[in-house]
Amino acid sequence: MAINKQQKQVIVFSTPTCTWCRAVKQHLKKHQVKFKDIDISRDERAARDMVRRTGQQGVPVTLIGNQPVIGFNKELINRLLDIKSH
């Protein structure tokens, strides 16, 4: 098994009813990317933090390192995490 280089910190701001949020999380899990899932519908402070960091009020917002990815932008997520798509 290859040793992974240090993975960037990944945070997904999401809500339970968001289809695109589920798609982002499934994609990350499929590629064994560890991430912290923050449900902004239950955490008002995290929701404010997301807006402050990104200017976005909608989800999903994925922070990879300090780079925000708005929506399910698979190509950008793959590039930032060095995921090779098949």
Image (cartoon, rainbow, N blue to C red):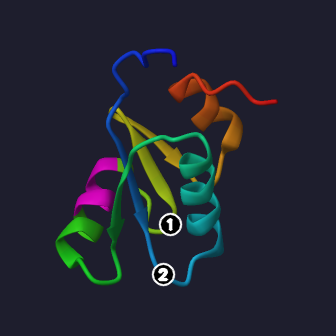
Instruction: Decide if residue 29 is in sight here.
Output: yes
Is 18 in front, or is 29?
Answer: 29
**Residue ID at (28%, 83%):** 42
Tell me the amino acid under the disc marked 1: Val
Instruction: Say whether residue 9 is left or right of residue 57.
Output: left
Vertical relation: 83 (above or below) 17: above
- Taking the view exactly as shown, the residue that stands out farthest to the right is 86
70 or 1: nearer the viewer: 1
Vertical order, 2 against 62 (above or below): above
Q: Nearer the viewer, residue 26 or 58?
A: 26
Which residue is located at x 82 percent, y 30 percent? 86
Q: Residue at x 31, y 58 (%)?
A: 50
Residue wearing tag 2? 16
Element type where label 2 sits in the image: loop
In space, the residues marked 2 and 1 are separated at their CA atoms by 10 Å
Instruction: Give neighbour class at mark 2: few <14, some 14-19, many 20+ (Cα, 10 Å).
Output: few
For residue 59, which numbered disc appears in the image? 1
**Discs 2/1, front:** 2
Measured as percent of width and height from the top left, residue 48 is found at 24, 67
Image location of residue 80, percent across then percent down: 53, 27
Magenta range: 49-53
At 23% from the left and 66% from the top, the residue drawn is: 46
Judge whether residue 6 is colored magenta.
Answer: no
Instruction: Let me know if residue 52 is in the magenta part.
Output: yes
In this rendering, would 49 be left or right of 11? left
Main SS, magenta residues: helix
